[in-house]
Image (cartoon, rainbow, N blue to C red):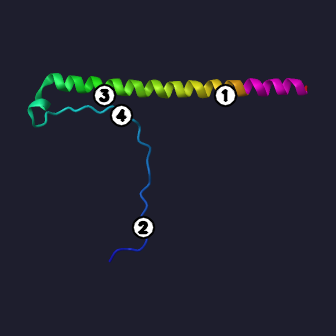
Amino acid sequence: MLSAVARRVPRTFVAPVRLYTIGRSEGSVAESRGFSKKEKAHEDQYVKQHEREQIEKLRKQIADKQAELAKLENEAEKKQ
């Protein structure tokens, strides 16, 4: 008989990892070396674009925080 209590599985952080197709699979297209090189290049391009977007997002957050810090410093100077 199954227990009425649902078991919870703890969530773990999974870091992004680049995964490439290593082995050969069936089919004439999958066997061609040019196709696998093209696939790897496409994956690399996608990952680099994603990383660029993440960096730009972080740079914007840093600029926003620096502007907020400057504003708070100005307010603190005016009160003194």
Q: Is residue 24 left or right of residue 18?
A: left
Q: Is residue 75 left or right of residue 70?
A: right
- Are the two marked residues, 1 and 3, in contact with CB atoms closer than 8 angstroms? no
Residue holding disc 3: 43
Find the residue positioned furthest to the front.
29
Please give the range of residues in magenta: 69-79
The question of residue 59 being in magenta is answered with no
Mark 4 and mark 1: Cα distance apart in space: 29 Å
Choose the circle earlier in sequence order: 4 or 2. Answer: 2
Amino acid at circle 4: Val
Amino acid at circle 2: Ala
User: Which is closer to the viewer, label 3 or label 2?
Assistant: 3
| Helix, strand or loop status at disc 4 | loop
Residue holding disc 1: 65
Residue holding disc 2: 6
Location of residue 68 in the rendering, given as x and y in whole percent from the top left corner: 72, 28
Find the residue positioned furthest to the right.
80
Of residues 12 and 45, the one drawn nearer to the viewer in this rendering: 45
Mark 2 and mark 1: Cα distance apart in space: 43 Å
Residue drawn where x is 34% and y is 23% of the image: 45
User: Which is closer to the viewer, label 2 or label 1?
Assistant: 1
Mark 3 and mark 4: Cα distance apart in space: 12 Å
Amino acid at circle 1: Lys
Q: Find residue 17 and name its label.
A: 4
Question: Measured along the vertical axis of the image, is residue 75 above or below residue 26?
Answer: above
User: Which is closer to the viewer, label 3 or label 4?
Assistant: 3
Location of residue 60 in the rendering, given as x and y in whole percent from the top left corner: 59, 25
Q: Based on the displayed image, in which of its 4 quarters is residue 35 positioned?
A: top left
Location of residue 56 in the rendering, given as x and y in whole percent from the top left corner: 52, 24
Location of residue 1 in the rendering, given as x and y in whole percent from the top left corner: 32, 77
The question of residue 76 being in magenta is answered with yes
